[in-house]
Image (cartoon, rainbow, N blue to C red):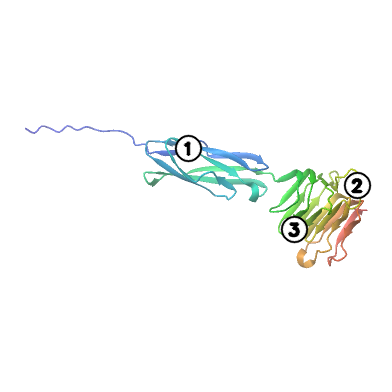
Amino acid sequence: VPVPDYQVEIKGKFVPTILQTNTNTISFGSIKKDASAKINLKKIGLENLSYEAISDKPWLKLGKNSGTIASTDSISLNIDPTSLQAGPFEAKITITPKVLGVLGKPSIVTISGIYDDTITGTIEGHVFTKNETWAGNINLNGDITVPKGFSLIIKPGTIIKIKKLPTPLVINVLGKLVANGESSKIIEFKSNETITTDGDWGGIVSEYDLEVSYALIKNAKVGLNFERVSNSSFGTALPNIHHVFFDNCVFGILDLKSNLESTLKNLSF
């Protein structure tokens, strides 16, 4: 004999499996070299979860770009300042989850800070691969080459003590040198020897862009040498040299072969 059907109502709420990060911002503050951090990941839910991670800046390196989370996981990150410009920086890491073959809502973590590229202390001889800024007390131990397209900025008050070598050390500027001190914070280029002579180091040789002011250049064979600067290499700029004291140099300034009309003022020899 048929009897009435019984109806059973099933209730509930489906909570999809999601990916959770421990932060959405990482601020490094001010950094002077490479810096590292870690993003912690957590799976909320029951289904299997995988993910892919990508950085939008080449200087922000990830320890891994994908993974599968049973419960928790982490991604290490590293800031490589080799190609990073000085000043504020910001990058974003996008972490996209996948559950049962379906892409979920991406998590975005913002990385920020300020890169202070000022160099101080001991500097060995090298060829620039990016712009450099020098400050404080510098011990210079080898030849420096600033290729075209790069610049060396020396901050007011910087004291550069230069090592005496068998072949006198040279600061060779094919790009740009800006060494502008202040009346109360002059820049000093001088020998590191206790007993100095004229010619302990070679001097500054510029073939392109040169600004030097409120500076002392001492013990050099040729303090400032821009004889090879020409209108074709220099464009419309001229060497900007003023308020410089040349002390115990064989030559203060060598400009004999340059076809530029140089403007020099407030110099002492």
Q: Secondary structure at mark 3?
A: loop
- How far across and how far down the image is residue 154, in percent? 78, 49
Q: CA distance from mark 2 to mark 1?
A: 61 Å
Residue drawn 21% across the image and 32% down it: 8
The amino acid type, in three-letter code, at marker 3 is Gly
- Which residue in the protein does label 1 denote? 73
Q: Residues within 10 Å of mark 3 (few under 14, many from 20)?
A: many
Q: Secondary structure at mark 1?
A: strand
Circles 1, 3 touching at the beta carbon (< 8 Å): no
Question: In this orientation, which residue lies closer to the viewer: 181 or 251?
Answer: 251
| Nearer-N-terminus badge (1/3) | 1
Q: Is residue 45 left or right of residue 95?
A: left
Residue that lies at the very extreme toward the left in this rendered image = 1
User: In front of the other: label 2 or label 3?
Assistant: 2
- Which residue in the protein does label 2 denote? 196
The amino acid type, in three-letter code, at marker 1 is Asp
- Which residue in the protein does label 3 denote? 175
The amino acid type, in three-letter code, at marker 2 is Thr
